[in-house]
Image (tube, rainbow, N blue to C red):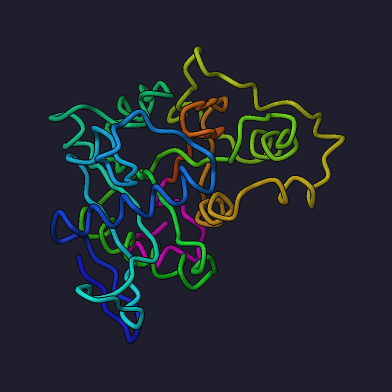
Amino acid sequence: MHIFEERYEVRFAANADEIKESQRLRYKVFIEEMGGSITSHPEMHQLERDEFDDYCYHLLLIDLKNKSEGSNGKIAAVTRLMLGSDAESGIGFCSAKEYDLGPLIRSQKKCLELGRTCIDKSYRNSLTLHYLWKGLGSFVSEGDIDLLFGLASFPGNDVRKISMGLSFIYNRFLAPQEIRPKALKHGLIDMNLVPETEFDKIKALGQIPSLLKGYMRLGAQSGEGAFMDRLLNTIDICIVIDVRQMTEKYRDYYGKSG
């Protein structure tokens, strides 16, 4: 999978150095910006990585016009992908640390897990997401993927600050029972916190991070319950996207018909 346009290139990491650069961007976003912590040694050199990286594809968005010495361009965004077949033959899905994925696995549908998606601070706009979705869509189409899923994060561990946003997602975007992951008990947060009659849609959307709203525009639905990740200082929800039921606006990216 490779997409090349005038300024931006979307492709998988070609070597260990590019994977390290993606892990360096993850460190900037998840550790420095969002206040997460890592348990690794100093020789990690400001990298955010885990045991799942060796089993995943690392999809990069590269700005070819922003080059430094020895590089082909600046990595502006990354996302990590794991196929169901690789999870089954390897160490499983990363999301399984927080959610019971039984319904997804029992569906017998071809699944692709999205993880560690992040965008450099200076590239957070709709164009960046457009290119990232385009690259992801190409991979999904080539692999004939049925379901996308993964963790999407709210920064911080204060549930009160996002109670309206969580409730809005729970009441409007809950996934069908037959494919709905459920948060594991040791980190479970009830998402149904504010009565629907008290919703303020503008306030709710204001509490939802831009990347998660991007997933929702793609047609994402939510698992049951949020999960408190104290290590990365986030509150996560498990999103599920049925590729064949995606919103019309994005369906062409994925080469699927409804």
Q: Residue furthest right?
A: 198
* Quadrant (top left/top right/bottom left/bottom right) for the N terminus: bottom left
- Left or right: where does residue 35 sit relative to residue 50? right
Query: Toward which corner of the image does residue 72 lie, by quadrant?
Result: bottom left
Instruction: Name the residue nearer the viewer: 50 or 109.
Output: 50
Left or right: residue 34 compared with residue 71:
right
Q: How many marks?
A: 0
Residue 228: image location, x then y, percent: 54, 25
User: Looking at the image, is 254 positioned above or below residue 222?
Assistant: below
Residue 89 is situated, as x and y percent measured from the top left of the image, at 12, 30
Residue at 45% over, 40% down: 240
Magenta span includes 249: yes
Q: Is residue 15 above or below residue 188?
A: below
Q: Is residue 253 above or below residue 83?
A: below
Query: In front: 236, or 123?
Result: 123
In the rendered image, residue 44 lying in the magenta stretch gets the answer no
The quadrant of the rendering that contains the C terminus is bottom left
**Where in the figure is residue 30, as x and y percent of width and height?**
46, 44
Q: Residue at x 71, y 34 (%)?
A: 167
Residue 18 lies left or right of residue 241; in this view the side is: left
**Residue 104, above or below 9:** above
Residue, far front: 42
Q: Residue at x 22, y 44 (%)?
A: 56
**Is residue 32 found left or right of 57 in the rendered image?**
right
Q: Which residues are magenta?
A: 242-258
Can you name the residue that lies furthest to the top here? Answer: 185
The quadrant holding residue 159 is: top right
Residue in the image at 42% along x and 63% along y: 251
